[in-house]
C-alpha cells in the first residue's frame, strides 16, 4: 500500500509543474510528449544502473505497444481534449472514473472478487473526487457545462487510464517494474511524438530545461515505478482505488504551495476520500498478504 500512496503523492505534483510550464508558453500535449521521452530516458538509466534485464519476446511487442499507446498516450490525449471542452475540475473528475472501469474490467477479465465493502468504498471515492475537484460545485452552480463530446472524451480518458493499471498488472507477472515501464514509455513516447514532437520544446527551453527534466522524473517516472511495484502484490481494483487519493493530495499541495482556496464542498470531498481510502486500506491490511513476485 505504501507504494501506491507514494505514487499518488508524486503524481499530485504534476499540477505544480504544469502551472509553471503552461504560464511559460508550453502546450499541454507538448508537455505530455516531453515527459514521456524524459521518463523513458530516465528508466533506461535506472535499468543500466541496476542491471535490470529489458529483453522481451517478439510475441510481446504488440502487447507492449498497446500498453504504451492505449494506457498512456491515449489517456493523455483524451484528457487534454476534454480540458478544451469543459472545466479542469470536471475533466479531472471524469478522468478519475478510472477505478470504476478497473473494478468492472477486473471482474470480467479475471473474475476478481469485488467484496461489498470495496463497492461502497468505490462509490464514496467517486463522490469525494467529484467534490474535491470542484466538479460537483461547478456543474450544480452552472459555472461549468458538460456537453456530450466532453462527457464522452472524459469517460474515454478514464477508461484508457484504467487500461494502464490492467496492462501493468499483466506486465508485472512476467517482467520487473523497470522493464514494464521502459517498454510502455517507449511506445507511448513514439505515439505522442506523432501528435506533438518533443525536440522543439526542449530546444527552446533554455533555463526551463531542468523543470522539464524534473517533470519527466518526479510526477512521471518515479510514480509509475512505485505503482507497478505495488501491483505485484495488490489487486488491480484495490490499487486503482487507493491511487484515487491523488486529487486530494493535489488539492492540499495547491493550497500549501500556491495559496489556492478551498470551499466547504471541496473540504467535504477531502474528508470523504480520506475516510474511504483509510477504511479500504484498513480492510486490506487485515487480508492475507499476497507473496510478491520475484524481480526478473
Image (cartoon, rainbow, N blue to C red):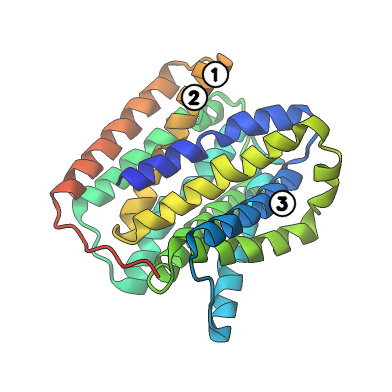
Mark 3 touches mark 2? (CB < 8 Å): no
| Mark 2: secondary structure | helix
Q: Position of residue 208 (x, y in %)?
A: 76, 32
Q: What residue is shown with label 3?
A: 33
Q: What residue is shown with label 2?
A: 253
The residue closer to the viewer here, 101 or 24, is 24
N-terminal-most mark, 3 or 2: 3
Query: Crowdedness of circle 2 by 10 Å Cα count: few (<14), some, many (20+)?
Result: some
Q: Position of residue 210 (x, y in %)?
A: 70, 35
N-terminal-most mark, 1 or 3: 3
The answer to whether residue 130 shows anywhere in this view is no
Instruction: Tell whether 226 sits left or right of 1.
Output: right
The residue closer to the viewer here, 140 or 18, is 18
Question: Which quadrant holds residue 194?
Answer: bottom right
Q: What residue is shown with label 1?
A: 257
Q: Relative to 292, does residue 129 appear above or below in the rendering? A: above
Question: Which quadrant holds residue 147?
Answer: top right
Q: Position of residue 238 (x, y in %)?
A: 31, 53
Instruction: Look at 30% across and 67% down and name the residue there.
Output: 293
Q: CA distance from mark 1 to mark 3?
A: 26 Å
| Mark 1: secondary structure | helix
Q: CA distance from mark 3 to mark 2?
A: 25 Å
Mark 1 touches mark 2? (CB < 8 Å): yes
The residue closer to the viewer here, 76 or 149, is 76
Instruction: Look at 25% across and 59% down and name the residue there.
Output: 114
Instruction: Look at 76% across and 46% down and name the residue there.
Output: 30
The residue closer to the viewer here, 272 or 44, is 44
Q: CA distance from mark 1 to mark 2?
A: 6 Å
Amino acid at each position: 500500500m505504501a507504494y501506491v500512496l507514494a505514487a499518488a503523492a508524486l503524481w499530485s505534483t504534476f499540477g505544480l509543474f504544469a502551472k509553471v510550464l503552461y504560464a511559460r508558453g508550453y502546450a499541454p500535449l507538448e508537455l505530455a510528449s516531453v515527459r514521456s521521452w524524459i521518463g523513458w530516458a530516465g528508466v533506461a538509466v535506472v535499468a543500466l544502473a541496476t542491471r535490470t534485464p529489458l529483453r522481451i519476446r517478439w510475441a510481446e511487442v504488440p502487447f507492449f505497444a498497446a500498453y504504451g499507446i492505449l494506457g498512456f498516450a491515449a489517456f493523455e490525449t483524451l484528457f487534454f481534449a476534454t480540458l478544451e471542452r469543459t472545466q479542469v475540475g470536471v475533466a479531472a473528475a471524469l478522468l478519475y472514473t478510472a477505478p470504476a472501469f478497473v473494478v468492472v474490467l477486473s471482474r470480467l477479465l479475471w473474475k476478481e472478487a469485488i467484496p461489498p465493502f470495496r463497492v461502497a468504498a468505490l462509490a464514496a471515492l467517486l463522490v469525494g473526487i467529484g467534490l474535491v475537484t470542484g466538479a460537483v460545485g461547478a456543474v450544480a452552480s452552472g459555472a461549468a457545462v458538460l456537453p456530450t463530446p466532453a462527457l464522452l472524451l472524459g469517460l474515454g480518458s478514464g477508461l484508457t487510464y484504467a487500461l494502464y493499471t490492467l496492462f501493468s498488472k499483466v506486465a508485472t507477472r512476467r517482467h520487473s517494474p523497470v522493464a514494464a515501464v521502459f517498454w510502455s514509455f517507449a511506445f507511448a513516447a513514439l505515439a505522442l511524438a506523432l501528435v506533438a514532437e518533443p525536440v522543439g520544446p526542449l530546444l527552446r527551453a533554455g533555463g526551463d530545461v531542468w523543470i522539464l527534466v524534473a517533470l519527466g522524473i518526479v510526477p512521471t517516472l518515479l510514480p509509475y515505478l512505485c505503482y507497478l511495484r505495488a501491483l505485484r502484490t495488490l489487486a488491480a481494483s484495490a490499487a486503482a482505488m487507493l491511487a484515487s487519493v491523488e486529487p486530494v493530495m493535489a488539492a492540499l499541495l495547491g493550497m500549501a504551495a500556491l495559496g489556492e482556496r478551498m470551499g466547504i464542498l471541496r473540504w467535504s470531498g477531502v474528508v470523504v476520500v480520506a475516510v474511504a481510502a483509510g477504511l479500504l486500506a484498513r480492510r486490506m491490511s487485515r487480508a492475507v498478504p499476497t507473496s510478491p513476485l520475484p524481480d526478473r
